[in-house]
Structure formats: C-alpha cells, structure tokens
Image: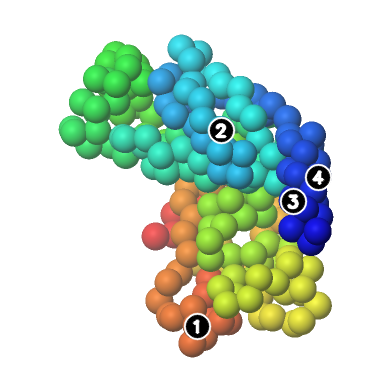
Amino acid sequence: MKQIFSIFVFLFLAIAVVAQSRIVDGKLVAYFIFPVQNIEVMAKEAKSIIKSDSLGQFSILCYPHDFIKIKAKGFHAVTRQVEPATDSVFINLVFANSKKNREIVIANGNISENDLLHAVGHLDHVNNDFGSYTDIFKLIKDQFSSELVVSGNKIYVKRQQIDYSEEEYETLGFPQVKCRVDGSVTNDIDFIKPCNIKSICLNNSTNLKSDWSSKEIVILTRNSDYQ
C-alpha cells in the first residue's frame, strides 16, 4: 500500500513540474553582432536539447527553475539561470580566439569566415557577455554561480558543505565578498553598468575553506587606466 502511495505522489509531483514547464526563446550572437548558428543549447533540469538556427535563434523547453547550458567548441562555456518569469534570453558567446578555434568555428558553420575574421580584427573589445546584462549583481551571479551567492546587493562566498538559501547567508551573518573596482576596495557597486566593464574576475589567492572573508571580485571599467 505504501509503495502504491509513493508512486502516486511521485507521479503527481512529476505532472505538476511538467505543467509548469514552458518554452524559453533565445538568441545567440558573437561580438554582439553576428548570429551564431548550429550551436547545441541544453536545459539542464528539463534535459531538453536544441540547436540554434541560421539567425542564432532557438526555442527550448525549460522547467520553472532551470539552467541553460552551452558548451561549444571555439567558445567559452555558458551557464545562464532561467527564473520562473524568464521568457527569453540573449547570449553573447565569447569566442576563444586562436588559429585552431577559427578553423573549427568556420568549419562548423557557426559564423562565416568573413564575419569572424572581421570581428577578430576589429571587435575584440566587445568579445564578452557583459553587455547582455542590465544589472551588475545578475552578471556576478551568473559569472560565478559555482563560487558565489548573491542576495540582493550583497555577495557571499558559497559554502559547499551546506545548501543555504540566499536569504540565510544574510541572516546568519556570513562575511560579504569585497569588491575592488579600478584598484579601490568598495562594496558599493550598484552604479556600475555591465556594458562599461572591461574585465571581471574572482581573486583566488586564498583558500575558500580556510578564509571565507578574503575573497574579492576584481572589476576594471572602460573608464580606468588602472592595470
């Protein structure tokens, strides 16, 4: 009897999740201009897979809380979180420029040879995904999802041993991650527009498990000469 009940509950939950699934439309480009075709796009939780068309567009089945993942030769891997309210995504694929990757991308028909050679020669300054975001905190959340937790405008190092919610990081008083913007340490980064970022990285000079508060996000903006 218990086994029958368990099966019933499992089927009920499975039907409920499927009922909440929906189609998310997307577009893949490189250098913010050129559509990228024939790229495999996967929804992690829904386990659906589709390829981008000649315009770089795709439509994929996603669950309410899902992740769109892209791992294509010649480009940096992408993981983009899909929230329940998300109905479309725009992803600028970052090209890993090398002679071998240029040959691969052209051979796979992802981008035409003329477009790719023009981009490599003249558009390197936009070969990043930052301009796809309107919110600096959403950018950090996506870029460092395996290492950081973002709760509102506060950033914490992710504790791997326990799966805390975003709110618990704040209520339990975990130390915030410091930010270094153009050489100056600050926690006020609300003013930074993602499209104005030259580079962003996580300082990994210390061990996550031994010193939680010493991590820092290093941001260089296009307005700074700081190196």
- The answer to whether any part of residue 22 appears in the image is yes
**Neighbour tally class for label 4: few under 14, some 14-19, many 20 plus, Cα within 10 Å:** few
Q: Label 4, on which residue? A: 12
The disc labelled 4 sits on which kind of residue?
Phe
Q: Nearer the viewer, mark 4 or mark 1?
A: 4
Q: How many marks?
A: 4
Q: Nearer the viewer, mark 2 or mark 3?
A: 3
First along the sequence among labels 4 and 3 = 3
Question: Residue at the spot x=44%, y=54% of the render?
Answer: 225
Is disc 4 in contact with disc 3, using a CB cutoff of under 8 Å? no
First along the sequence among labels 4 and 1 = 4
Separation of residues labelled 4 and 3 (CA atoms): 9 Å
| Above-or-below relation of 186 to 224 | below
Residue 84's x, y, as percent?
Answer: 77, 41
| Above-or-below relation of 1 to 105 | below
Give the numbered dot on residue 5: none
First along the sequence among labels 3 and 1 = 3
Q: Label 2, on which residue? A: 48
Q: Nearer the viewer, mark 4 or mark 3?
A: 3
Secondary element at image label 3: helix
**Neighbour tally class for label 1: few under 14, some 14-19, many 20 plus, Cα within 10 Å:** few
Question: Residue at the spot x=62%, y=55% of the render?
Answer: 141
Residue 188's x, y, as percent?
Answer: 70, 64
Q: Label 1, on which residue? A: 209
Q: Label 3, on which residue? A: 7
Residue 35's x, y, as percent?
Answer: 47, 19
Q: Quadrant of the N terminus?
A: bottom right
Separation of residues labelled 2 and 1 (CA atoms): 35 Å
Q: Is residue 198 left or right of residue 87?
A: left
Q: Nearer the viewer, mark 4 or mark 2?
A: 4
